[in-house]
């Protein structure tokens, strides 16, 4: 008898990060980094892990959405799911009743992403491979079969996806050797949170460059003068050889973004990230034209492949920032990697939060081996917190992600962390409550 | 002592409409029309009613989201909220932690809409006015103050909104007299659900025209031949004097939409609704250019004012279909009405579902009195089901909505309906369960 999917185990896990202003930016001043965490098991006893990343309030809504998705999964034959992971993803995103709540956006879509990711984690563990290697070992047709071409076929067809993947397969063995030897480039955001004082920013920037990072990102949106002053302080510290980018976290109007970026550009900027609403394709395009050669980056809040299609095909973004937990999981991110490859836009994933670094490194490494076949102009974001809660935390050396060799997607939280940070009953929260 | 907001009363209400295929279309084949229903009370004892409309599974996620919004509202001073309803809306949509779950889209945004609508209902009851009249009595500056101009200011400023509203105020008394005498134009979708057999469609279409409707809408997406056949049957029945529109409910790719609409256009089409993904502004624009003079209509799934801004300013839609329960309530719909007025696009609200007709009639009547100042090319959708569950159901005469005179927004469900259709414990669901 073959294995079937069992009821989910779901946890509301929250870290009290607002106490230290880790993660503070122009729009998110006091995040409590959180995960609506799901354990997907089969009746054969194997397990996979996934989560929706949130920043506090509303994590319980994501928990409820995971329960909503659970009803579509429990009882499915595990081998049938593994043999058609693309069909499994479409089963979830095409469910008409759940789809009404998006469509393909917001909490329900994020919960579907967590479940799809958890099943990929489970499958990679079963195959004894890290996810990047499992994916890179699939054929172009198998990979294209993971993509939902609905509503993107005007720009990317199945055959075109197969062509892109086939072209990229040349030289992949050599790239894998280089990846294992050298790692994947990273940039650091740890220095530049908006709520940090100058001396802390400078000390952290010095530390990051010393640790081998060649690209740092600072948060902006504190006001043009404050932003410029801080950016110049950092530029003076790191010199001209280090790339600097800034992140406005959607704080600006279109005209304001253009004015502010022109003002900041004197300090030498690689990209400006989320200058305005992530829904505003036309706004991003206007900004991109006005601030070139500074690139416009976006994606961590882009809801789905349909919005990415427009962002990429129009030239609205020059840097594509996929997020492991915003869209419908690995499958939809492969669609976005293919769209980015078609338009020659480098993918530099968003990370940080809870476990986003652990996840996106796999997607970047897969992109390098099988889709874009390049690390040119590409860095995966790195933020230095909360890694200690993961069973397989990321490893960085000389400003680069080491390729993980452990089976799975890196998405498993330590059991003790799940217990301690469960909200509101876990030890960490009880202690905060009693400390008043 | 002034009144404050009390904890919400929240209900998971579902109607087993999938049993009869009411509401069936190309993407939503078996909806159970549902409402995550919220009662907002003040300590002074008055109450307002709102809801998230869903089509079944996931209604409990919307219930959870209402609880998430509740925490931001309970304890607020009611008079302060009433004196700055724009600020109240922004308090909810700008909450950084909840915003992460959209931003401004999906379940959390819909729950905010339900709460904003409930407070408007409460305020209108307190003032003893139907909502359309309360809104139409506000000054241009008061109305513009309700709008969140964030991320739309490149296309619509506060001053421009005031100008539009000031121009529209001329003649509003005369328009109100006409509205009260003649009602607001409606079109009927009751005849054309995809799951209905031909004879039922034809009988219902004959009934609708006999009842005074001059505009009917049919669902398409069953396949080009089946769609064309049914459309011709209806055209032959109603003759050339009745407008016909079709609704694809997002079923098509861009090229497919263009081909299918050209094929159907011979039967005489006013608009094609939701030809493809509601996120695809570029796709709608391509379709609009290709199928003119047939208009492209969309909006019931458009997530927020930022997407509407692009749809309207680019010419992607020629008919703007606001939905009372998709965006952040009355406030954001006023933003959309203003954007539509700026670009001269008629607003023809989406309705049907649970109570959407009851709500949108107020917004259309307000649009006529205070924003577009016209009913030319405008109809509010009418679907003939579930009205009996509302305390103040819509009243139609000769194919037009009668202006409601009762205080409030029309959003209150009968207490017996809430009890009977509560899921899963209500009488209706217990009976279905025991009937097997």
Image (cartoon, coloured by chain):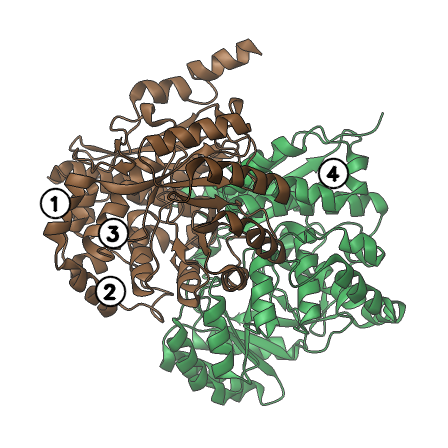
Chain colours: A green, B brown
Q: Quadrant of the N terminus of chain B?
A: top left
Q: Is residue A139 above or below residue B315?
A: above
The residue singled out by tag 3 in the image is B367
Label 2 vs label 1: CA separation? 25 Å
A50 left or right, relative to A86: left
Label 3 vs label 4: CA separation? 55 Å
Does dot 1 land on a helix, a strand or a loop? Answer: helix
Label 2: how many Cα within 10 Å (few below 14, some 14–19, many 20+): many
| Residue A47 disc label | 4
Does dot 3 land on a helix, a strand or a loop? Answer: helix
Please give the chain letter of the residue carrying mark 3. B
Q: Nearer the viewer, residue A33 or A371?
A: A371
Label 2 vs label 4: CA separation? 55 Å
Q: Nearer the viewer, residue B122 or B183?
A: B183
Q: Residue at x 17, y 60 (%)?
A: B140
Residue found farthest to the top? B434
Residues flagged by tags 1 and 4 on a common chain: no
Label 1 vs label 4: CA separation? 67 Å
Mark 2 or mark 1, whichever is nearer to me: 1
Q: Are marks 1 and 4 in contact (CB under 8 Å)?
A: no
Q: Quadrant of the C terminus of chain B?
A: top right
A351 left or right, relative to B74: right
Please give the chain letter of the residue carrying mark 1. B
Labels 2 and 3: the sequence-earlier one: 2
Please indicate, yes or no, whether residue B223 appears anywhere in the rendered image: no
Please give the chain letter of the residue carrying mark 2. B
Q: Is residue A333 above or below residue A219?
A: above
Residues flagged by tags 1 and 3 on a common chain: yes
Residue A82 screen position, x and y as percent: 79, 41
Residue B189 screen position, x and y as percent: 42, 37
Please indicate, yes or no, whether residue A25 appears anywhere in the rendered image: yes
The residue singled out by tag 1 in the image is B177
């Amino acid at each position: 008898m073959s294995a079937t999917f069992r009821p989910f185990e779901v946890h509301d896990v929250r870290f009290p990060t607002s106490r230290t202003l880790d993660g503070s930016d122009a729009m998110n001043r006091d995040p409590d980094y959180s995960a609506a965490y799901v354990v997907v098991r089969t009746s054969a006893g194997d397990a996979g892990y996934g989560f929706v990343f949130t920043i506090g309030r509303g994590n319980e809504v994501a928990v409820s959405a995971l329960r909503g998705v659970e009803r579509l999964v429990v009882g499915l034959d595990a081998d049938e799911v593994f043999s058609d992971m693309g069909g499994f993803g479409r089963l979830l995103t095409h469910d008409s009743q759940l789809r009404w709540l998006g469509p393909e956006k917001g909490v329900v879509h994020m919960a579907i992403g967590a479940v799809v990711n958890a099943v990929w984690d489970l499958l990679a563990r079963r195959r004894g491979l890290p996810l990047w290697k499992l994916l890179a070992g699939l054929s172009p047709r198998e990979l294209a079969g993971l993509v939902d071409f609905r509503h993107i076929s005007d720009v990317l067809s199945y055959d075109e996806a197969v062509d892109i993947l086939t072209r990229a397969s040349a030289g992949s063995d050599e790239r894998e050797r280089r990846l294992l030897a050298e790692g994947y480039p990273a940039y650091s955001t740890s220095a530049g949170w908006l709520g940090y004082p100058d001396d802390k920013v400078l000390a952290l920037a010095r530390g990051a460059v010393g640790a081998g990072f060649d690209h740092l990102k600072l948060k902006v949106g504190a006001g043009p003068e404050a932003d410029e002053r801080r950016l110049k302080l950092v530029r003076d510290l790191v010199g001209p050889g280090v790339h600097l980018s800034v992140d406005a976290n959607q704080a600006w109007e279109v005209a304001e973004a253009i004015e502010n970026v022109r003002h900041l550009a004197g300090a030498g900027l690689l990209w400006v990230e989320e200058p305005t609403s992530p829904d505003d394709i036309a706004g991003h395009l206007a900004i991109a034209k006005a601030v070139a050669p500074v690139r416009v980056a976006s994606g961590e809040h882009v809801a789905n492949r349909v919005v990415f299609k427009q962002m990429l095909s129009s030239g609205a973004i020059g840097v594509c920032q996929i997020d492991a937990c915003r869209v419908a999981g690995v499958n939809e991110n492969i669609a976005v990697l293919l769209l980015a490859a078609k338009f020659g836009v480098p993918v530099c994933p968003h990370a940080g939060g809870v476990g986003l670094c652990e996840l996106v490194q796999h997607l970047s490494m897969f992109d390098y081996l099988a889709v874009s076949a390049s690390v040119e102009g590409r860095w995966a974001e790195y933020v230095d917190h909360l890694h200690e809660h993961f069973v397989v935390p990321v490893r960085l050396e000389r400003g680069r992600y080491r390729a993980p060799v452990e089976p799975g997607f890196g998405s498993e939280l330590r059991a003790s962390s799940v217990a301690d940070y469960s909200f509101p009953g876990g030890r960490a929260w009880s202690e905060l409550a009693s400390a008043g």
